[in-house]
Structure formats: structure tokens, C-alpha cells
Image (cartoon, rainbow, N blue to C red):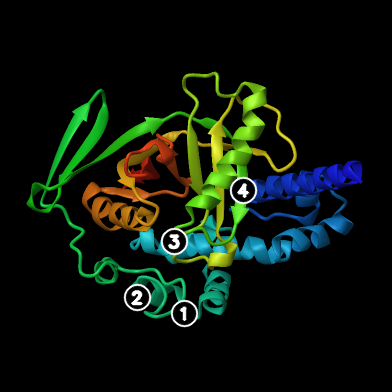
Amino acid sequence: MKADEGRRRYMVGEYISRINRVIDYIEANMGRALTLEELAATAGFSKFHFHRIFFSFVGETIFHFIQRLRLEKGAALLLNEPGRPVTDIALECGFAGSSSFAKSFRKHFGVSATEWRQREGLPSGTPGQTKSKQRQMESNGGQELSPASVYIEYVNNIQKWRFIMDQGKETRTVDVKDLPEMSVAYVRYVGPYKGDGQLFERLFGQLFRWAAPRNLFNSPDVKTLIIYHDNPEITEEEKLRVSVCLTVPSETPVDGEIGKMVIPAGKYALARFELGVDEFQQAWDWVYSTWLPESGYLPDDRPCFELCHNDPQTHPEGKSIVDICIGVKPM
């Protein structure tokens, strides 16, 4: 019986690994047409079975999943780049043109792309709405998110922003610098995660139990991070994807529920925080609503992630020290 259970768990892990590989492939190639044949080949399944297998694990058909990711990417670009033509956004997201994008966008979100931009997301009160800066302040009990003063300096070719918050009680720093390409091993989770510290402990525990026997902690440069693949103000909670990651040598083999992907090199903004389990959303809101508008940068479509610097269980207040990392490009 134990042998049968072990084999079953191995097979489930292998299927999850293949599905994750396909999802990573879709995200890397979203701007072009994708065929059932190439997706099935990426997963290592027959095309006759792949569609049903994908649906059974993800809960969506493969092409509905691709369409949703394209529309959600378009929704984020409409807000992040308000001056950019809708046609350009449609093409970048894999649509044939603005007409097909507009029709699909309205069907999915219930508003036109123009209305989405004007309202800064879904209408107020809609589940998963994207909040404007004003609504963010209201949702935080009127707390002022803006800094009292800003200082910009350069240290070792790194642009460093120092925000002196109201009444000088707090200083926040944001570094803008080039990060190298990083290969990471990951464990992925799909579903709600806000405020669930035990979820991340469990996922990191699974990843570390895999990494320790392989001596992957020996490098002095090893990093742990959490990648957020979806915008929680656009994507339904049940479909949010998050990956807990460990940097590994590029040639590291993975299997089962442990996947591997590459975080692209480039310019990132790194905002340093010490956060309790319920403070992460406010920190992300501050980066997007306060720092970005002041910075002269736009967010690009590389993954956003948290770079973890400590074990919160060893912190005197149980807090996590993290850099919120956002890929950026000039405005």
C-alpha cells in the first residue's frame, strides 16, 4: 500500500510539473499565436489528452486560460500606460487587432477598454476592483500615503530614493538598479493568499526540504523570493498564482512539484519594508500609488516579486524584511 501511495504522489507531482511548464511557456510567449500541438508538446502529453488533463488540474480550458491572461495583461497595461494606443496594447497581448481585443475585453470585464481607463479599473464595489490612489487612501481609513519630502541620490550607479514620511517619523528607501538574470526553483500555489502567513511557511518548507539534500544552500548568494504572477485587483482570488522560489544554478535538475524558471535581467525598483502579516497589501499600494507616480518610471511586464531577507520567526516583532521588486522602464 505504501508503494502504491508513493507512486500515486509521484505521478501527481509529475503532472503538476508538466502543467506548470506549460503555464511558464504561455507567459513567455503570450504575444504570439499558440497552438494546441506546441503546448501539448511542451507538456509532453498527446494533444488528444492534453486539453482534458489541463482542465482537470487548472479548472479552465487551455484557450480560456490563455485568453484570460491576455485580457488581464491588457487591463494592467491600460492603467499603467494611459497614453499608449489600445491597438498597441492589443497586439502586445496576442490579439489580432483592437477590434477583437475590445470585444473580448468588454465580455470579460463588463466595461470597454476606454471606460476601464477612465474609471481606473472596474466600477466601485465590483469584486476585485482596481483602486485609484484616492480610493486607496479611503480604504486605509484616510491615512495619507504621500511623503513629506523626497531626496534622490546616486550610490555606486544605483538611483536611491529616500522618502521622509509625514512629521519625519519614518524613512522609506527605494533603489532603482539593474538585476542579473536569476534561475529559480519554485513551488506554485493557486488561490487566495492575502494575510495567510502559514501558507507561505508551508510552501517554503516544501521547497527547502527539496533543496537541502541537494546542497543548494551552500552558495553565499542564494536568495529566496515570492513571485506574484497576477494582479489581485484584476484577477479573481481563486485564480491568483504565486510561486515561492529559491535561486539555483541554471543547470539544476527539477522534478515533480518543483519547477524551474528564469527571472529576466533588467532594471528593477526595490522598496525595502519590515512588514507584519497583514501589512503587505498596504506596502504594495504605497509603491504603486506613491513612489511610481513620483519616479518617472512605468512598470513593465516582468514578474513582480518580494525578495526575502529574514525568517520572520527570528524577528523580535515577527516581521518580514523584504524588498518589493518591480520591473520598470522609463516613462
Instruction: Pick whichever of labels 1 and 4 is earlier in the sequence.
Output: 1
Q: Which mark is residue 76?
A: 3
Mark 2 closeness class: few <14, some 14–19, many ≥20 residues within 10 Å: some
Q: Are marks 4 and 2 in contact (CB under 8 Å)?
A: no
Can you identify the residue that label 1 sits on? Answer: 111
Look at label 4 and name its amino acid.
Answer: Arg
Mark 1 closeness class: few <14, some 14–19, many ≥20 residues within 10 Å: some
Query: Is 261 left, or right, of 140 in this rendering?
Result: right
**Residue 117, x across and y down, in percent:** 37, 71
* Image depth: mark 1 or mark 4 in front: 4
Can you identify the residue that label 4 sits on? Answer: 188
One can see residue 17 in this view: yes
Q: CA distance from mark 4 to mark 3?
A: 22 Å
Q: Is residue 258 above or below residue 59?
A: above
Which of the pair 12/264 is nearer the observer?
A: 12
Task: Please identify the residue farthest to the left as the structure is shown.
Answer: 167
**Residue 253, x across and y down, in percent:** 71, 28
Look at label 1 and name its amino acid.
Answer: Val
SS type, badge 2: helix
**Residue 27, x across and y down, in percent:** 60, 50
Q: CA distance from mark 1 to mark 4?
A: 31 Å
Can you identify the residue that label 2 sits on? Answer: 119
Q: Are marks 4 and 3 in contact (CB under 8 Å)?
A: no
One can see residue 95 in this view: no
Q: CA distance from mark 4 to mark 2?
A: 33 Å
Instruction: Pick whichever of labels 3 and 2 is earlier in the sequence.
Output: 3
